Image: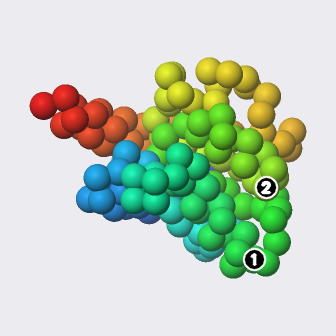
Amino acid sequence: MEQQRLFDEKMMRLALDEARQALAEEEVPIGAVVVAEGRVIGRGHNLVERLHDPTAHAEMQALTAATELLGGKYLPKATLYVTVEPCIMCAGAIAWAQVGRVVWGADDPKKGYRTYSERVFHPKTVVDRGVLAEECTRLMEEFFASLRH
C-alpha cells in the first residue's frame, strides 16, 4: 500500500509539472498524465485559451495522447492522474475510454463531475482522490487570486 502511495505521488508530481506548464502559458493550471504498466503513455495540460477550444482540457489531451500511442480507444489497464477533479465532460471521456483508475489531487466542488453525478465512470473504474491535494489546490488558488489583482 505504501509503495502504491509513493508511486501515486510521483505520478501526481508529473501531472503538477504539466499544470505548471499550463500556468506558464496563462492557462488554468491543470495537468494530467496517463500511466500504464508503470510508464507514462500520455500527458496533457489545459490548452483552452491557446486553441480557443473549450474541450481542450488536460484530461482530454492526455487521453488522446495515450490512445494514439496505444492505437486503441480503451484504457482499462491505465491510470489517469489529474491535478483537479475532472469536470463532467472529461468524466464522460474517461468513461468512454474505460480508464481503469482515476486519481486526482484537488476536489472541485463547483465544476467537478460529482456536482452532477457520482455515477459517470465505467463501473470497474477505481477512483482515488486527495493525492498531493494541498499542492494541487494551492496552484489553483494562486492562479485565480492572480486574476483578481
Question: At which x and y percent is residue 16?
Answer: 39, 55
The structure residue drawn at horizontal position 79% and vertical position 28%, both measured from the top left corner, is 119
The structure residue drawn at horizontal position 64% and vertical position 44%, both measured from the top left corner, is 90
The structure residue drawn at horizontal position 81% and vertical position 65%, both measured from the top left corner, is 73
Q: Which residue lies under the disc numbered 2?
A: 97
Relative side of 31 to 143, left or right: right
Foreground pick, 146 / 125: 146
Q: What is the number of callouts on the image?
A: 2
Relative side of 89 to 22, left or right: right
Q: Which residue lies under the disc numbered 1?
A: 70
Amino acid residing under circle 2: Ala
Q: Quick one: which residue is furthest to the right in this view?
A: 123
Question: At which x and y percent is residue 2?
Answer: 56, 50
Relative side of 100 to 86, left or right: right
Secondary structure at badge 1 equals helix
Question: At which x and y percent is residue 38?
Answer: 63, 70
